[in-house]
Amino acid sequence: MRKQLGFLLAAGLLAGGGNSVPADPPATPMIASELSAPIQLQADGHVIDHGVAWGHCSPAMLDLNGDGIRDLAVGDFSGKIRYYVNRGTDSEPSFADADLIQGGGKPAEVWIYCCIGAQPRFHDLDGDQELDMLVNSYDPGHCYLFRGIEKSAQKASGPIAFAEREELLDKVGVPVRSAPIQEQTYQSFGSFFDAVDWDADGDLDLVIGCFDGGLKVRFNEGNAQQPVFASENVTIEIAGEPLKVAAHLCPVVADWDQDGMWDIVAGSDDGSVTWFRNIGKTGTPEFAAGQTLVGKHDGNGYNIVYWPGDPVVPGIRSQPEVVDFNRDGKLDLLVGDFYTAFDFRKDLNDADRATVTQLIEETKRSGEAFKSRMEKLREDFARRYPGDEIYSEQADREWQIAYKELQESPEAKQMNQAGATFVSKLRPFLNSMRSDGDASHDLPQSHGHVWLYLRK
Amino acid sequence: MRPSSHALFGNRTGMLLVGLVMLTGCGPIGSPPFEPSGSPQQASDSNPIKSLAEASPADPPSIDSSNRRSDSPVAISMQFEPDQPRAGEPFVVSLNLQIAAPFEIQAVGEPPPKIATQLEMLLPDGFTAPAAWETPLASRSFAADGHSVYQGTVTFRRTVHPHESVAPGSYMIRCRVRFQACDERRCLRPEEPLLERAVQIQPAA
């Protein structure tokens, strides 16, 4: 608990508290010059949207049904993985929504209830010539293996099926996770996994993307047929400092610059995608400082105002895939995302829009006083309790008192009152809402898309 | 779907006080239609708790809630008002939740994927609770989406009616509370503690 408080204060994560009114329409994120503007992938003629599952899409592209043409698998917040069959060609895919990928006769599933999507990665982990499916989890943050089934055992027209879920354990029987020895049950929550032969010894090691934005590797001390994972992780560094993104590092191993050395392409909580070029040697990878392929989302990703017809831009919680999408010999980028946005009525006139805009501005202003007090409180604690002192009992006690006072302050009441007014006034302008509740977050709809950035 | 190899409360049970100690010396008198300390029945409940078979990795613990578990940010206590009600006279069961900052728990009725707070009351034979829980006023989360939450100290109340034929004695009131604590950046594992406390029923007036 105290560590959590210290973490929040030190990182300044509470500074934006209470800001739940709509953001301005986000600007298109910066993208590397080598990439074309992003477009949303479609299935059955419609934009892929996993909003019903609270988004957090995580795509993978590979031939799942054995017809020689690559299909699409998309994990999301439900913890399940949806299969989109490719009815087009390998160079001009045309996807159709097919079914959920199965594991052990039921939908393959991992436990997710916060902040990330299920990320399916496909490798032959046990050397049986069948692709296995590795999937991450939020809780407990362990790595799950769905072994590939022999093609002959698959039903010809049935769903894509894998064996029952297994939890990957290390050589001493502890689940493979970002914190092998945990002081708190949630210490490994929100991890991601991919596999690569890191040390070039002929078997697959595990790459672990961490909730705090770091990257670790878990070496395979076995072989390509019988993996035996070490009991410790190795933290990956760049020039003596941990390799990091903002948070929720979602890794994909790919030779992005096609120089013959695999690299790390990493998604992030803030929506960015970063390329960490491997400048080491085979078996001893080293990484250059990250280069931004996709900039962070402009805003916090919630309650976005898109007027009907406005261009939608990629959201937060980027989960990437690297693939030569159009078979032109150049690797492209697929990125899954998440955001919430208001679904405005299509018949709003200019006066309606002006009313909505004014309402938004007023509500924003009403929250500024609270936000300012919260920021001052955070700064005060950071100043009075530097370093590890923030973990002290005294700091904890004082924080709880100050926090309670802040909740009961006129600024908080003003903000809450304005929020209730905002809901009642905005509702008539909306075409649909997430729920019938009377809180501001009941209004916007959630979304999760798969964005394609073609390499120029 | 849940990871079967992970025991949610495996390292916590030693910290928990089982409410049965509160029954000591509280045996029933006579042979009334409704016997004390019998098998609980589930109260008519407008906010039934959902099965956690898929969502919770282990059986929930039973706790006397005056203690906070060391790795949970939420401490729960149960009180009765009046403390020793008479048979045939209603009394109020209060669940007091102390939520340590900077955590908050999702409000009752929050739509998925939020894991809403849910309450279930398990009553012995002869006790009923026809009205729903009175829930505290929710506030707005400090998280970016500003969803509805409870912060700080909040109290849930529900009126229980012991039938006038209930014999004087000790009866166990059980409440299951399902909640999930989150801070601005992450959510902890949902918890589902079962609270137990004996109520001393006095003879009808």
Image: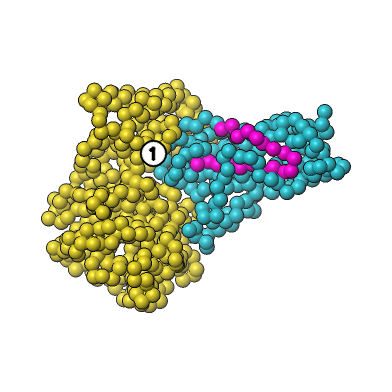
Chain colours: A yellow, B cyan
Amino acid on which disc 1 is placed:
Arg
In this rendered view, identify the residue nearer to me: A167 or B185. A167
- The answer to whether residue B119 is magenta is yes
The quadrant of the rendering that contains the C terminus of chain A is bottom left
Q: Position of residue A321 (x, y in %)?
A: 27, 58
Residue at the image position 44 percent from the left and 67 percent from the top: A104
Residue at the image position 42 percent from the left and 48 percent from the top: A114
Q: From the image, tell me which residue sits under label 1.
A: A434
As helix, strand or loop, the secondary structure at mark 1 comes to: loop
Residue at the image position 44 percent from the left and 49 percent from the top: A113
In this rendered view, identify the residue nearer to me: A395 or B177. B177
Residues drawn in magenta: B116-135
Q: Position of residue A223 (x, y in %)?
A: 37, 77
**In the displayed structure, does residue A257 sit left or right of residue B164?**
left
Instruction: Report the residue that reaches farthest toward the front.
Output: A157
Please, is residue B181 above or below residue A401 in the view? below
Q: Position of residue B144 (x, y in %)?
A: 37, 38
Please, is residue A187 above or below residue A310 in the view? below
**In the displayed structure, does residue A255 sit left or right of residue B139?**
left
Does residue A382 appear anywhere in the picture? Answer: no
In this rendered view, identify the residue nearer to me: A414 or A449. A449
Q: Chain of mark 1?
A: A
- The answer to whether residue B120 is magenta is yes
